[in-house]
Amino acid sequence: MTMWGSIRETLKNNIGTGNFTNWIEPLEFLHVDNGVAYFNAPTKFFGDYVSQNFADQIIYHLNRNGAQTERLSFAVSAAANNPRPNVEPKPVANPVRMPSEGSVIPDVPLDPRFTFDNFVVGKPNELAHAAARRVAEGGPVTFNPLFLYGGVGLGKTHLMHAVAHEIRRRNPEKTVLYISAEQFMYRFISALKDRKMIDFKQLFRSVDVLMVDDVQFIAGKDSTQEEFFHTFNALVEARKQIIISADRAPGEIKDMEERIQTRLQCGLVVDLHPTDYELRVGILQTKAELYAEQFPGLEIDPGVLEFLAHKITTNVRVLEGALNRLFAMASLVGKPITLEMTQDCLADLLKSSERRVTIDEIQRKVAEHFNIRLSDLIGPKRLRAYARPRQVAMWLAKQLTNRSLPEIGRKFGGRDHTTVMHGVRRIDELSEKDSQLADELELLRRTLAS
């Protein structure tokens, strides 16, 4: 318990008093067993939020204090009462306003790490970053709503927190409310139960900027969608800024009402693409510099960051978590981070992240995409109509498999590894100048990864 007390103080300094009071202080630390740290939390949602937003830091500090920890487990405290309902109640007819102390905007749990300064910009996210910057600068509402979408760990939440931080810095008099769609629903349900719908409406319609994360969560929940629709309309009519994020485009969110989909599409819709190799290296370099400040003298061998960027390709959170684990291990054993340590320390993660796409699959998909015969793709003909798709297939084989260049060459009609190397370099060069080719490469990558 003394160890947890010390860790709590460190976390308080790192994440800020507001985040600490809201999310860390209510946790009850139980024990660590077989690499799992057990906690009691007030609600399941509470535990899920802490796991999503603060798990890496908690695990790091537990390991640093000698408690070998790989993951966290949260149980709902036996003392918790009035659990959240699983089914939405029907709206209460003629709700009666109960006495209250006023509709005060709660302290928003913004992560102090998620700022524009800490956001690494690359080709896959540059449009989203530019749009978020424009909104954060204030002035006339231009994009309303700004809708950010993409897969897990691509930076949607980071950008939303960064916008909130920047607006508060530039215009401290503005009321900014950042909330997850899940929290929006829980607050709505509580207002219905407690007959405080007027307070609820005043709370959400009095803000200057409303930010709703993971809006796909309210899909299929009719009552919540109804209230969200009216809140959205009221804020747009008042020319208040709305920023929304989701894991897919508005028109692709299943069970979302069409009228809401239409509203979400009326602003600027921006897709955060999966990270490319250069962006992943940039993210790792930025993180490594921050860790180097915390652990002066701790060395990391050349090639380690590049190795991680090649191996872990799907999720930035997993990528950052891997680096966090490496620095924690190195600080505990007092040794530099080498490629050998990386492979040993992250064996489970690297195994789960292994690419399972085969060269045969790549060749079939590329031939189909460019509408050529498979025999021509891998055959000896050097016509441009076949050579360029062949180089694309080689590039994808290099990116998506663990095969060596000679192995790839053998799968392409027994070509030499230097031919493969030339093809890969040629596609790298062309994709930087040709946006259409870059889009085709991204489309093929996504298709093969799905």
Image (cartoon, helix red, strand yellow):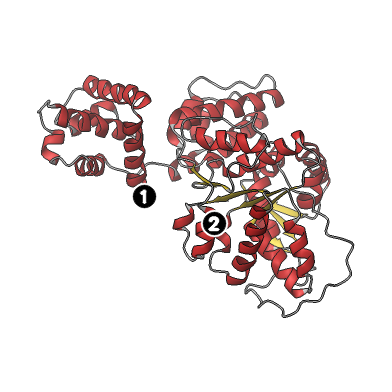
What amino acid type is highlighted by mark number 2?
A: Arg
Mark 2 surroundings within 10 Å by alpha-carbon count, few (fewer than 14), some (14 through 19), many (20 or more):
some
In the displayed structure, would residue 174 be above or below residue 336?
below
The residue depicted at 70 percent of the width and 70 percent of the height is 189
Residue 242, position as x, y percentages in the image: 63, 49
Direction from residue 268 to residue 391 in the image, left or right: left
What's the amino acid at mark 1? Answer: Ser
**Element marked by disc 1:** loop
Front position in the image: 269 or 280? 269
Q: Picture coordinates of residue 54 (x, y %)?
A: 68, 45
* Left-right relation of 428 to 220: left
Q: Quadrant of residue 96?
A: bottom right
| Residue named by callout 1 | 450
Asked whether residue 113 appears in the rendered view, the answer is yes
Q: Is residue 219 left or right of residue 186?
A: left
Q: Give the number of the disc on residue 263.
A: 2
Which residue is nearer to you in this view: 332 or 124? 124
Quarter where residue 369 is shown: top left
Residue 154: image location, x then y, percent: 52, 41
- Give the class, few, some or many, for how many residues have Cα within 10 Å of label 1's Cα (few <14, many ≥20): few
Q: Can see residue 73?
A: no
**Relative to 342, is 233 above or below?**
below
Residue under the point 80% across and 44% down:
8
Tell me the element at label 2.
Answer: helix
